[in-house]
């Protein structure tokens, strides 16, 4: 099985790389793998974001309705720095956790395809280049 850190999944650049991967013409079997990977990743992103919101909600100051209070920049407010640091630590624990994809082998990309180094680095755990 292939594992990827949660923190990588939620990067906007990772989404861009997946979009680039979706534009490559490859065999049907690899297309099926890509669609499986995308479904898994989207579901995990939802789990990660929901978990982050739960952690923030646990530690932050709440308004009269029980919603997190936020500052002008949209950041949650905390009673003190110690509580804020604990919240950030709990979120970091979520981000470094590894997510297991439902595929056994990496997605094979023809060596003739052009792919940027930036995207290749982000996707190196799920793709391989065919000779």
Image: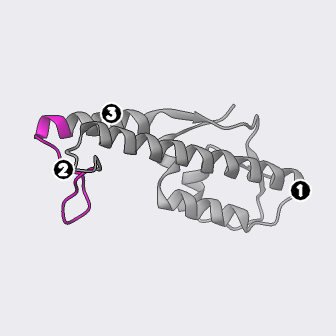
Q: Which residues are magenta?
A: 68-84
User: Does the stretch in magenta take in 80?
Assistant: yes
Q: Is residue 124 visible?
A: no
Q: Earlier in the sequence, mark 1 or mark 3?
A: 1
Q: Residue at x 31, y 43 (%)?
A: 56
Q: Name the spot of residue 110 as percent of width and height, x first.
A: 79, 58
User: Does the stretch in magenta take in 52?
Assistant: no
* Label 2 element class: loop
The residue mark sitting in front, 2 or 1, is 2
Q: Name the spot of residue 70 as percent of width and height, x first.
A: 22, 57
* Label 3 element class: helix
Other residues around mark 3 within 10 Å, as few (<14) / some (14–19) / many (≥20): some
Residue annotated with mark 1: 28
Instruction: Name the residue nearer the viewer: 115 or 13.
Output: 13
Give residue 90's mark. 3
Q: Earlier in the sequence, mark 2 or mark 3?
A: 2
26 with respect to 48 (left or right):
right
Contact between labelled residues 3 and 1, with CB atoms less than 8 Å apart:
no
Residue annotated with mark 2: 77
Q: Name the spot of residue 12 as percent of width and height, x first.
A: 48, 61
Which secondary structure class fits the magenta region best?
loop
Q: Earlier in the sequence, mark 2 or mark 1?
A: 1
Q: Name the spot of residue 33 as percent of width and height, x first.
A: 79, 48
Contact between labelled residues 3 and 2, with CB atoms less than 8 Å apart:
no
Other residues around mark 1 within 10 Å, as few (<14) / some (14–19) / many (≥20): few
65 with respect to 128 (left or right):
left
* Label 1 element class: helix
> On the image, which quarter does residue 91 sit in?
top left
Q: Residue at x 66, y 44 (%)?
A: 40
């Amino acid at each position: 099985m292939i594992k990827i850190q949660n923190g990588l999944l939620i990067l906007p650049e990772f989404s861009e790389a997946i979009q680039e991967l979706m534009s490559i013409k490859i065999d049907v079997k690899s297309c099926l793998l890509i669609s499986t990977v995308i479904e898994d990743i989207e579901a995990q992103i939802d789990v990660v974001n929901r978990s982050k919101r739960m952690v923030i909600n646990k530690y932050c100051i709440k308004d009269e309705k029980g919603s997190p209070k936020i500052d002008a920049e949209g950041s949650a407010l905390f009673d003190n720095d110690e509580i804020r640091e604990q919240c950030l630590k709990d979120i970091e624990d979520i981000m470094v956790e590894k997510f297991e994809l439902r595929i056994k082998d990496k997605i094979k990309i023809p060596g003739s395809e052009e792919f940027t180094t930036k995207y290749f680095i982000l996707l190196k755990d799920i793709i391989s280049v065919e000779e």
